[in-house]
Structure formats: structure tokens, C-alpha cells
Image (cartoon, rainbow, N blue to C red):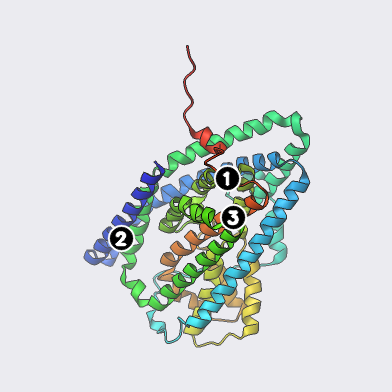
Amino acid sequence: MAKRLFQFIILAMILGIVTGAAVHASASPETARDIAGWFKIVTDIFLRLIKMIIAPLVLTTLIVGIAHMGDAKTLGRVGFRTIAWFIGASLVSLSLGLLMVNVLHPGAGFSLDQASTADAAPTAEAFTLAGFITHLVPRSIIEAMATNEILQIVVFSVFAGTALAALGEKTRRVTELLEQGAFVMLRITEYVMLLAPFAVFAAVAGVISIRGLGVIITYGAFVGGFYLSLVILWIVLSAAGAAVIGGGRMKSLLGVIREPVTIAFSTASSEAAYPKLLEKLERFGVSNRVASFVLPLGYSFNLDGSMMYCAFATLFIAQANGIEITAGQQIAMLLLLMITSKGMAGVPRASLVVIAATLSFLKLPEEGLLLILAVDHFLDMGRSATNVVGNSVATAAVAKWEGQLRDPAVDRPVIEEALEPRPKPAE
């Protein structure tokens, strides 16, 4: 079933490209926008279904995972290793983005009249470290779940899971109930993912109906340079993963996650791939307690593709405006992005907001954001897929360090058993 779904998604993507190109070539701009609006309905429904299951899925799986870890020492060790990997991956992603944009100079000679002003550019949001830290703590778990605030759900889940682990046998039934709730959410995920090919078709057809394929040619140096950088980042992440879990297992991991990667790429949403990614990682052999702990944190702290894009796009805008950014300013920008990029998952066009804030920090014209709006969706597809790969490697690496990465050929993952139909009892 998983293989067929992947094939359907690829077919839907191809049909979306063909349909979108046909609409763009034959319809007027106004008609194309109207048609794209109808396509957007399908995409929005799918993304809303994903958002519907994200909060309860993260809450139940994370609490159960922490409760099963046992003592606080184990939790602290896993947390330290997870954050250490995230910091290292963030530095590599940002540094590689800065290196590639300095080597390729995609903004050099770029004509400013090529910029599309069809979309309104987001404005920079005021960022303070105090505000960010305060926002981590939910005022209400109900409010956090209603607004899909993943970081706040993680904070509550850590407290709840630690409490259940400390109480042990006294709250065993509560833990079992939450575990059953997680299995229910995973089954719902299976149903929602059946709609993925329709969402992929609509997402790709909609954006190409309006923009057309020609916009990629106009921004060829920028788009090509960024995707080349992503390829190099994939190689670096794969090499790091292979060093920890082994080359053979790393190759197997890339094969296992191809479906969530394709979903993230075609819908330009890392969040859309989260439920399926959690399932695939457990099928790969990552224990539930590690996967349900590392993955939600990764979606807030380990967005490798998005961080690279923020660095790459900011310097592209500077180059296009003929403004030189010194090495010292680039280092300061890297440190700023290390903080401001955290928690951007699930926020629409969050990368653009982070870039707007960075432009303000560097005293660059914020109107330069209009330069990248025309191709932002095409680039969002690549960075979303990269976010999925980065978090998959991080989760597998932490599981290996913890001795929680099993061979699925020997030990069947719990999730696989839970999703199988139960035999009817004998009458």
C-alpha cells in the first residue's frame, strides 16, 4: 500500500505540472487565478486535516514516549544529545548557505525589474529573546493544542510524561490510555494520507497555473544555486547519519522516508509529512520513545532546509541590490538566525518573516523581499523536503546512541502491530 501511495503521489505531481502549465498557457491571468483558487480548496482541506491530527498525535506519542523512558536521567541524556545534534546541524546548514551564496553570487547582475510585485511582502516581526522564552510556556494546553503551538505542546508533554514515569504503577492505566489514543491517531493518519495524491496534484497545478514554468528560468541562478546547495546539504546530512548508524542503514533510511519527503516537497509543507514520517521512522526501527520525543523537537529546532534558505536568500537580496555584507556582519547574521529560525514550523511563510527580520537587522531594504516572492513556493518545496530528511537523520542518530535503533527484520515495531487488523475472536 505504501509503495502504491508513493507512485500515486509521483503521478499526481506530474499531472499537476502538466495541468498547471496548460492552464497558464491557455487562460487569462484572471481566469488562471480563479482556477488556482479552486485547486487551493483541495490543498487547504488536506492541510487542515493534517493540522487536525498534529496536536493530539504529538501530545499522546510524546507523553507516552517520555513515560516509557523511565528516570529523569535517561530523559536528560536523550534531551542533551538531541539538542547537541540540532545545534550542530543548524550551524552546518547556515554556514553552508552562506558559503554557497558567496561562491555562486546568484544575485550578481540580477535585474531588479525582474522582481514580481504581485504578492504582498510580509513585514518583519519584532523578535526578543525574552519574548521567545516566555512563549515557550503555554498559558493553557487547550489553547496550545487549538493553535497547534508545537513547542508549547512539547513543554507540557515533558512535564506530563515525567510525572507519569515518576508515579509508575499508580498511573499505568493513564499511560495505557494515552498509548491507545496514539494508536487511534495513527490510524486516522492512515486515512488522511489516502488524500495526499489529490492534495499534491492541486498544490502543484495551482501554483504553476499562476506563475507558469517560465518564472523558474528568469530566476535560474537563484533557484539552481539554492537547489545545488540543498543537494550538498543532503550529502552532508547523509554522511553524518552514515557515520552514526552505518552506511547500509542510512541508505535504507532514505528509502523508507521517500513517501513523507515527497509529500513535504509537493505540498511545500514539512508539517504535512509529520504523521507519516513518525510512522515510517518507527517502521525503520527507531523506538517509539525516541521518535516521539526527538521528532516534535526537530520540527521546531532543526529545520535545516529553512535555515539554509534564510541565509542564502538574505545575501541574494544584498547582492541584487549591490550591497556588500562584511564577514563580521555575516557571522552576526548567522548567530541571529540560529535563534530567530527556531519555532518557525507550522507558521505560513515563516521563512519570509525571518528573512524580513534579518533584512532589518542588516539595514537592507525590506522591499528586497519582493525579489524572492515569485519563486518562493518552488524553493519552499525543496526546503520542506530537506527539513524532513534532516529530522529523520537526527532521530535515527539519537536512537542509535541510545541503543533504541532495532533491526525491523528481527523485531517488529509496535506501530506495525497496532495498525494490523485484529483477528475476530472465536465464537
- Disc 1 crowd, CA 10 A, few/some/many (<14, 14-19, 20+): many
**Which SS class for mark 1?**
helix
Which quadrant of the view contains residue 136? Answer: bottom right
Residue at the disc numbered 3: 245
- Foreground residue among 330 and 113: 330
Instruction: Report how far apart the C-alphas of labels 1 and 2 lie in the structure.
Output: 32 Å
Residue at the disc numbered 2: 17
Q: Residue 192: in sight, yes or no?
A: yes
**Residue shown at 69%/61% (left/top)?**
84
Q: Earlier in the sequence, mark 1 or mark 2?
A: 2
Mark carried by residue 213: none
Viewer-nearest of discs 1 and 2: 2
Type of amino acid at the residue the image marks with label 1: Ala
Type of amino acid at the residue the image marks with label 2: Ile
Instruction: Report how far apart the C-alphas of labels 3 and 2 lie in the structure.
Output: 37 Å
Q: Earlier in the sequence, mark 3 or mark 1?
A: 1
Which quadrant of the view contains residue 262? Answer: bottom left
- Disc 2 crowd, CA 10 A, few/some/many (<14, 14-19, 20+): many
**Residue shown at 52%/39% (left/top)?**
186
Type of amino acid at the residue the image marks with label 3: Ile
Q: Position of residue 354 (x, y in %)?
A: 57, 68
Residue at the disc numbered 1: 55
Q: Position of residue 407 (x, y in %)?
A: 56, 44
**Residue shown at 27%/58% (left/top)?**
19
